[in-house]
Each structure stands twice: as C-alpha cells, then as structure tokens.
Amino acid sequence: MNQERLNKLFAFLEEEPNDPFLIYAIANEYLESKPTEAKKYYDRLLFEHENYTGTYYHAAQLYLDLGDKEKAESIYKKGLLICQKENDRHALAELQRAYNEFLYEDEEEDEW
C-alpha cells in the first residue's frame, strides 16, 4: 500500500465523491495490506455503482480469500449479468474465466 498515493486518492474523492474509479482505486490500494478496508470500498461499489464492471472480479476474489465462497459466487454471477448488460466483453471474458476456475476448484474440493 502506497500511503502517498492513497492520500491523493482520498483528496480526489473529496472533490468527486461519486466517482467509481476513485473508489475502485482506493479498494485496490488496500487490497494487499488491509483486505477488510478494501472490502468496504468494493462493497460500496457493488451497492452504489453496480454497473462498474471492473469491481466484480476483484471483489469476488477478495471474498474467496476471506473464506466466503457463497458471497464470492453471488458476486461472480451478478458480475457476469452486469458485464453482459453493459456489453463489456473484456470484463465478461475475464470474469467468466475466474468463475469457471472457482467452479472447478469447488468441484475438486467436493470430490475429497
């Protein structure tokens, strides 16, 4: 986490409090070192800016890392629908690959 960059992002967010990119950038800054803080910002994006397609991949992965498979799966599924609705093919392909991997890993765990 780069505190200087984070401070700049918060300053920009004060000027543009509804800018989804800034919220997304803050979530990504927190992702490695403070995942629970990142979760707050991803949750905000999912609630306030549900059409911001870039959120779904990272938010689902974070929930997986935090051990909440059900929430991760629901985020994947909703994200796939939003990406289709927004015609964001790149995000759709990325999210579909991640979701398929999630399903495959979940299936492998069930076999044990």
Image: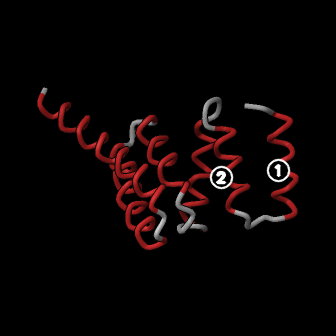
Numbered disc 2: secondary structure: helix
* Residue 55 rendering spot, x and y as whole percentages: 54, 54
Give the residue number, with chain letter if any, for mark 1. 10
Label 1: how many Cα within 10 Å (few below 14, some 14–19, many 20+) = some
83 to the left or right of 34? left
Mark 1 or 2: in front is: 2
Question: Does residue 91 sit above or below 81 in this rendering?
Answer: above
Look at the numbered disc 1 and give the secondary structure of its residue: helix
Residue 51 position within the rendered picture, expressed as x and y whole percent measured from the top left: 54, 68
Can you say whether 9 is above or below 19 in the image? above
Q: Amino acid at mark 2?
A: Tyr
Q: Which residue is identified by label 2?
A: 24
Q: Quadrant of the N terminus?
A: top right
Whole-percent x and y of residue 77? Answer: 35, 59
Residue type at the position of mark 1: Phe
Q: Using the rendered view, name the quadrant where residue 18 is placed.
A: bottom right
Q: Is residue 74 left or right of residue 49?
A: left
Q: Residue furthest top?
A: 112
